[in-house]
Structure formats: structure tokens, C-alpha cells
Amino acid sequence: MNNSLFLDGDLAEIVARLPPEVMNLAGKRVLIAGGAGFLGRYFLAVFKKLNEEVLDQPCKVCMLDNFRVADPKLLDELGDWGELVHADICRDPLPDGEFDWFIHAAGIASPFYYRAYPLETLEVATVGTQRLLECAKNSNARFVYFSSSEIYGDPDPGHVPTMESYRGNVSTLGPRACFDEGKRVGETYCYIYHDYFGVHTNIIRPFNVYGPGMQKSDYRVMPNFAAQIAAGDPLMIYGDGRQTRTFCYIVDAMVGFFRIVLKGVLGEAYNIGNPNPEVSMNILADTFKSMSPVNVSMQMTEYPDSYPADEPMRRCPDIRKAELQLDFRPTVGLEDGVRRFLSWSIPRYRSELASSS
């Protein structure tokens, strides 16, 4: 497989850290909605590696995507991983046949894009989720829904790190509401289908996942900083740079996601992230600057019109539930993760810049 979308060592590490229950995937059928996105492509790559190296019978993978914000050409770099269905989960016919797992990773996660597509962002988390849950009900399948840490809104400082039981400090109004509230309604659909219809659901709330495979056009902070280094531009920090986040490297995140897919307690929601360190955007920029192969400066700037400015001041997960129930323990620290990400992103982004000039 051409691994230019990933680091070879990362894929091997993900597979090596999966629990024994991974063997339960042998001979099963999995539908992945949103498989052309950042996380979806990792699912495809890991399933491909499992089929080639681990499982005694292949797991059959069917992937859906409408390619509104994903580039279909990226799938060519994955090789032969399974069946592609070009479809919109909100209105197009969904694949026939029964599946053992539904992984709903479809959605518009970058603030740049959900600012541009607010109705579509809301629809895929609501209409799309219910349609997939109906299919899961009819198949008697497990259903895993990708929600977001954004459902917590701007948490009260007394609830940071944030547990799954925190109900959130959110607003139904404003440029972020289409994403935040859409994800919350999607979670409610999961609750209803589990509680009323017995569908085996789990909810994943990722916290700032990053790593190789993030495209320069994603416009979140990690690829933004990497793209600016690749271009020799200053690192642009929105606002005053005091807003804080924790960041979870893709290897740790995928291990957590698969643990939920394979052994999550039915009906439960899980935070997946790395609670340490919680850093300001100023410190994150310093980290990128210190690891840059070229000298770069840092510069404060106002939020662009294309980016919703009412972002939370803090975002940090409490992952004790995932630790206790799933034995999820992130191992990749921020500096190691940024180093791995830059080793992939700088040559990739520079190549893209050269080809477009």
C-alpha cells in the first residue's frame, strides 16, 4: 500500500495496540459513513492492514461519502480496501444487505467548513444519524457515532477536565451552534434508539485529534501551523492566544476508537483524548516554532470572517471512564506527536505548494 497519507510506523503501532477482541471482526461486515475524511481514512487503512496481517477471514468494508469536503483522489493512495458507495446519507438510498457494525464518522468537523455549510452540518448529524440508526436497527448491528467534545460548549472552569456526565455550557445561537447542537441531537437519537429499540449504540467524543493525513485545507490549528511553516510564513495565532486545548495524536485516538467499537459498554458515551498537557495556543505555537526546520516568527491576528470566533476558552477531557472500562491510555506526548506530524506534513504540504505554483 502507498502510505503517503500515513506514517508506516503509526499504522503498525495502532494495530499492535488493539485488544484481543479485534479477532471478532473476522468475517464480519462493516459500514463506515464518512470514510473519506481524516478519521475515516484511518479506519479504512487499519481495516486493510488487519485483513492483510491479522484476521483469519477478511472483514468486508463498505464506505459511504458524498465528498462535499473530502477529496476523492486521496482514496487512491489507500489501495484496495473495500467497496465505495458515493452517496449522501441524508437523502440517497443506503446500501442493501445486513452489516455487523455501523461507524458513523460522516460530518463537517472543521470550523472553516461548517461556517460555510451550516445547514448541511446540522443535517448530517440529525437526519443522517437517524437514517443510519434505522439501518442498524434492521441489521441488529452495533452502531458507533462520532460526536464531539464541542457538545460540552465552553465548560465552566469547575468542570475542566470535563467528564462525560457534564451537561454542557452551550448556546443554540451563533456560528458554532450548527455543529455543536447537531452533534447533541445526534447523541439524543442514539439514546432513543438504544433505550426504545434496543440498538447497540456507543458515542465517541473526540478531543482535538491530529496527525498525518490532515490536509492543508483543513484549516484547524495543527495543519494551519504546519502549512505556515511549509510556506515559510509566520505562525498566525487567532485572538490573544490564551485559549487552551489538549491534543490527542492519531495513534492514541484510533486505539481508543477501536476499543469502543470492539468492547464499549452498550449505550455509553466516551471521551477520547489526551488530558496532558493542556496548552495555550501561544505555547503550541512555541512548540511548532522550536521544531520547525526553518526559522519562523509568530504573529497575533484577528479571527478571519471564515472562522467562527466564539470558541471555548478551555478544552480538556477527563478520560477516567475510558481508562476504567476500556483500558484506554494515551502514550504519545505532545512534542512526540508534533514531531511525527511535522515529519509528514512539511514535505507533503511543500509538494502541494510546489505543484500549485
Image (spheres, rainbow, N blue to C red):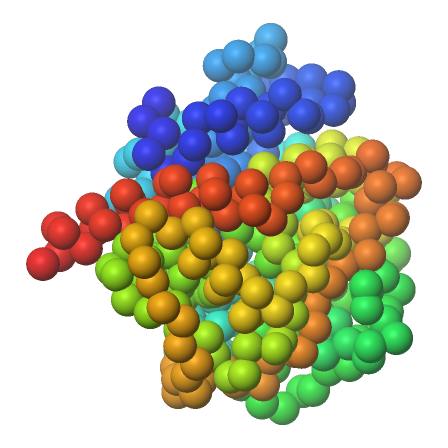
The extreme bottom residue here reads: 173
Image-based side of 259 in relation to 247, left or right: right
Q: Position of residue 25 (x, y in %)?
A: 65, 23
Q: Position of residue 299 (x, y in %)?
A: 40, 77
Q: Position of residue 21 (x, y in %)?
A: 75, 22
Q: Residue at x 72, y 53 (%)?
A: 276
Frontmost residue, 257 versus 198: 257
Task: Decide: is 11 above or below 254.
Answer: above
Residue 303 visible from this viewpoint: yes
In which quadrant will I find the C terminus? Answer: bottom left
Q: Residue 166 falls in which quadrant of the image? A: bottom right
Frontmost residue, 264 versus 214: 214
The extreme left residue here reads: 357
Task: Decide: is 9 above or below 218.
Answer: above
Q: Residue at x 60, y 13 (%)?
A: 55
Image-based side of 153 in relation to 112, left or right: right
Q: Residue at x 49, y 14 (%)?
A: 52
Residue 135 visible from this viewpoint: no
In which quadrant will I find the N terminus? Answer: top left
Q: How many marks?
A: 0
Frontmost residue, 27 versus 345: 345
The extreme top residue here reads: 56
Q: Residue at x 67, y 87 (%)?
A: 172
Task: Decide: is 176 above or below 245.
Answer: below
Image-based side of 353 in relation to 312, left or right: left
Q: Position of residue 53 (x, y in %)?
A: 53, 12
Frontmost residue, 352 versus 76: 352
